[in-house]
Image (cartoon, rainbow, N blue to C red):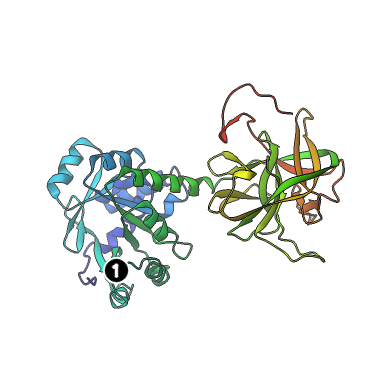
């Protein structure tokens, strides 16, 4: 179904898009244009960075799904029946939108979007900025193909004022649309009757939001460097390229995690492997999303870790492969500036393995190979709670040595 109907209220919809970005601001749909702009400004500061760029509408006939969505801050719902919309609006603070043929209307009967079904390349060509008058478009992809059409839509609509959403029948589909060509579509219409899809999509947004934050890293002074013999060490190969100054947080104790550099630097004897961190032995902890840790031995293809740079900025990355091999190890201990806490890590004794140093701002070295490390050198560590249960930080008495 090609988009052919005009959208009389299109010019008023740019504020609508902004108000939908933060879930709490959905009520702005039925407000005046000036009040919308004001409410958007007030709410934007409280909204999470990732969700400021993504719209989520929920299309369901399940009250459980509605409850789960509202609890997570998504309050715009699509209805095929006005009676159902009014019934739910009387029991929960939601903003109902009503589907009537190829158009979507708000509670004041103002058209806010159009729906376009796409099941062929020809129909996809019709959904282009020059061919539609509506600023807000909901695309219902049919026929099995989703990723490539979504990428084409992202490319075609980049820079346009309107909002482009895709109908998703589960949380996995929604992530595909939100990540197409890295930037993703503007949002999704989650058409589900299982509240697990609401929970999973919210968890996905939480991980994205979390990755916008900055970790606090601390300087620690190396107090011991000692070759200790053979052990089973883990190379973590990611599905992402790391830059100089990036690595993984690894440590023998969860209370102090060392920032271990990737093998992205060129050397005379071995090619750069910017996807790899030679991370340490099987018993060591590594930091993963959600404020958790995992044993290096537990990592495998498809798991997620966090990549951290010299300034504490971090992002998530997918593990592509893990290699465990027996190699000579070196023990490194370091004390924080107070001198009260000592942290330790074992690493392979090789020139390609390095710890990241504090950023001096003077163009100094980014990392020190463990083979060159000496007492008195400064490295970066992440201080955190030591007690862990299945990787989750807990409050309990613990002694680690």
Q: Residue at x 41, y 56 (%)?
A: 175
Residue closest to the eye, 11 or 256:
256
Query: Is residue 212 left or right of 194 when viewed as pictured?
Result: right
Q: Where is residue 202 shown, x and y percent of the image?
A: 40, 45
> Dividing the picture into quarters, in which one does residue 387 lie?
top right
Extreme residue toward the bottom, this view: 122
- Circle 1 Cα neighbour tier, 10 Å, few/some/many (<14 / 14–19 / ≥20): few
Q: Quadrant of the C terminus?
A: top right
Q: Which residue position holds label 1?
A: 143
- Dot 1: what SS? loop
How many labels were placed on the picture? 1
Residue closest to the eye, 62 or 133:
62
Compared with 352, 8 (above or below) is below
> Dividing the picture into quarters, in which one does residue 275 lie?
bottom right
Query: Is residue 2 left or right of 226 when viewed as pictured?
Result: left
Extreme residue toward the top, this view: 397
Query: Is residue 275 left or right of 292 when viewed as pictured?
Result: right
Q: Where is residue 42 shown, x and y percent of the image?
A: 40, 44
Compared with 161, 390 (above or below) is above
Q: Quadrant of the N terminus?
A: bottom left
> Dividing the picture into quarters, in which one does residue 276 lie?
bottom right
Q: Residue at x 57, y 36 (%)?
A: 391
């Amino acid at each position: 179904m090609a988009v052919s109907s005009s959208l009389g209220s299109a010019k008023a919809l740019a504020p609508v898009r902004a108000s939908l970005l933060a879930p709490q601001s959905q009520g702005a749909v039925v407000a005046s244009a000036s009040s919308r702009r004001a409410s958007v400004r007030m709410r934007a500061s409280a909204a999470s960075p990732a969700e400021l760029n993504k719209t989520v509408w929920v299309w369901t006939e399940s009250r459980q799904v509605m409850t789960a969505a509202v609890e997570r801050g998504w309050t715009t719902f699509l209805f095929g029946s006005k009676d159902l919309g009014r019934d739910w609006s009387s029991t929960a603070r939601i903003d109902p939108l009503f589907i009537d043929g190829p158009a979507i209307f708000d509670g004041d009967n103002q058209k806010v979007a159009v729906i376009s079904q796409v099941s062929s390349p020809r129909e996809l060509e019709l959904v282009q900025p020059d061919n539609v008058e509506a600023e807000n478009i909901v695309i219902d992809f049919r026929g099995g193909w989703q990723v490539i059409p979504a990428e084409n839509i992202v490319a075609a609509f980049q820079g346009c004022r309107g909002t482009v959403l895709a109908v998703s029948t589960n949380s996995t589909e929604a992530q595909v649309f939100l990540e197409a060509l890295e930037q993703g579509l503007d949002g999704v219409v989650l058409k589900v009757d299982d509240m697990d899809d609401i929970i999973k999509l919210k968890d996905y947004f939480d991980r994205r939001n979390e990755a916008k934050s900055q970790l606090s890293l601390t300087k620690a002074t190396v107090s011991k460097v000692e070759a200790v013999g053979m052990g089973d060490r883990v190379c973590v190969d990611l599905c992402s390229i790391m830059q100089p100054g990036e690595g993984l947080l690894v440590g023998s104790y969860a209370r102090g995690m060392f920032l271990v550099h990737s093998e992205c630097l060129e050397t005379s004897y071995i090619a750069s492997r910017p996807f790899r961190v030679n991370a340490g032995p099987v018993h060591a902890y590594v930091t993963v999303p959600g404020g958790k840790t995992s044993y290096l031995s537990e990592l495998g293809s498809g798991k997620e870790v966090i990549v951290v740079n010299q300034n504490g900025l971090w992002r998530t990355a997918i593990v592509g492969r893990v290699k465990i091999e027996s190699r000579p190890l070196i023990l490194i201990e370091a004390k924080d500036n107070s001198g009260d806490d000592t942290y330790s890590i074992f690493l392979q004794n090789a020139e390609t393995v390095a710890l990241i140093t504090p950023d001096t701002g003077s163009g100094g070295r980014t990392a020190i190979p463990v083979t060159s490390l000496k007492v008195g050198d400064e490295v970066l560590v992440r201080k955190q709670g030591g007690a862990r249960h299945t990787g989750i930080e807990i409050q309990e008495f613990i002694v680690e040595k």
